[in-house]
Image (cartoon, rainbow, N blue to C red):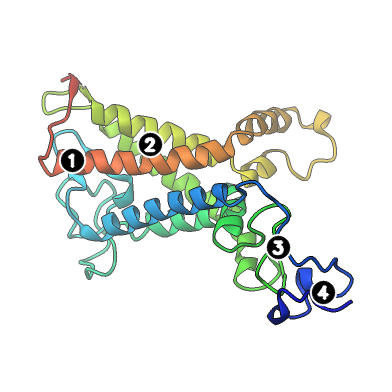
């Protein structure tokens, strides 16, 4: 059969290849199938624009009185980091303005999420249109899956998972340091927000599909590996919430940074509960 007349320029591969039904309509779906991809792309865009701007501004990322550090700048390793914010020393000298102070954390944040199984599903549909929705043909004429560059990099996800665990440990350390005030022990709204963000980040990180595989993968007999079976069961339960945790942590990351920015810039003062 010939290629459909409605799309003569699409070539003869993919859904337009010989042997596929020649359907003139772009899709036979009559519902608002484009709404979920649209919402997804809007959500991503908000986060990407916000995080990019904040990554480069180099202002209002540290509250000295309460040790609040935004996760986008942690660890801060440069000699230009605000005094007190470099919890792990300053092995890196001055950085030009085009290199963010969070140069270590940002690529991990980006690559871990970009290669995440959930985010793949989301942006393959919403950004890459491969395909945009069930029963909606994709505009691409060729499909090579994740077998070629750049998508073959998706296979490195497990390594980004290890890196993300280290980053989350660093964030945990940062969070513990917030339980103080100039007079000693203290808890403020910032402490609560930063701690909640870390808890959610652990939820997102440990619910990762790679983590699930590390916990229980490649075993022939669960009965011979009761500890790993138990871990796998726990991660599996968390894994069912991975999508929610992916979105929640996008929100808590922005909220944490935004709150630290407001307090650090003196726009508001931290609401203190203790100390
Ligand atoms: Fe989503 Fe690993 S972080 S699958």
Q: Quadrant of the N terminus?
A: bottom right
In three-dimensional space, the C-alpha distance between marks 1 and 3, rounded to whole angstroms, equals 45 Å
Question: x%, y% of residue 209?
Answer: 64, 44
Asked if 39 appears above or below 271 in the picture, the reply is: below
Which of disc 4 and disc 3 is earlier in sequence? 4
Give the residue at mark 4: 17
Residue 7 shown left or right of residue 44 in the figure: right
Proximity of marks 1 and 4: CB atoms separated by less than 8 Å:
no
Which of disc 4 and disc 1 is earlier in sequence? 4
Question: x%, y% of residue 81?
Answer: 19, 55
Residue 34 shown left or right of residue 259 in the figure: right
- 182 or 247, nearer to the observer: 247
How packed is label 4: few (under 14 Cα within 10 Å), some, or many (20 or more)? Answer: some
Local SS, label 1? helix
Question: x%, y% of residue 109?
Answer: 44, 53
Question: Label for residue 262?
Answer: 1
Residue beneath the point at 54% across and 50% down: 162
Give the residue at mark 3: 137
Which of disc 3 and disc 1 is earlier in sequence? 3
């Amino acid at each position: 059969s010939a290629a459909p007349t409605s799309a003569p320029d699409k070539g003869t591969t993919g859904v337009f290849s010989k042997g596929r039904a020649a359907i003139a309509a772009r899709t036979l779906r009559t519902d608002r199938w484009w709404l979920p991809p649209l919402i997804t792309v809007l959500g991503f865009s908000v986060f990407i624009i916000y995080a990019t701007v904040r990554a480069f501004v180099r202002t209002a990322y540290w509250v000295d009185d309460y040790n609040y550090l935004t996760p986008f700048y942690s660890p801060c390793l440069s000699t230009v980091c605000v005094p007190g914010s470099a919890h792990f020393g300053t092995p890196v000298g001055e950085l030009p303005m085009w290199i963010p102070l969070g140069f270590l954390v940002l690529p991990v944040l980006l690559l871990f999420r970009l290669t995440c199984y959930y985010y793949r599903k989301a942006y393959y549909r919403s950004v890459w249109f491969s395909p945009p929705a069930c029963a909606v043909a994709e505009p691409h004429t060729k499909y090579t899956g994740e077998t070629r560059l750049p998508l073959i990099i998706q296979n490195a996800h497990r390594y980004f998972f290890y890196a993300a665990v280290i980053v989350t440990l660093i964030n945990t350390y940062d969070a513990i340091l917030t339980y103080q005030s100039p007079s000693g022990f203290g808890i403020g709204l910032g402490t609560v927000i930063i701690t909640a963000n870390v808890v959610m980040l652990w939820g997102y990180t440990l619910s990762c599909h790679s983590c699930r595989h590390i916990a229980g993968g490649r075993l022939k007999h669960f009965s011979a590996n009761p500890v790993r079976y138990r871990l796998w069961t726990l991660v599996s339960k968390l894994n069912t919430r991975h999508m929610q945790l992916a979105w929640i942590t996008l929100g808590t990351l922005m909220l944490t940074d935004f709150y630290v920015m407001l307090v650090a810039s003196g726009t508001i003062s931290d609401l203190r509960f203790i100390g």
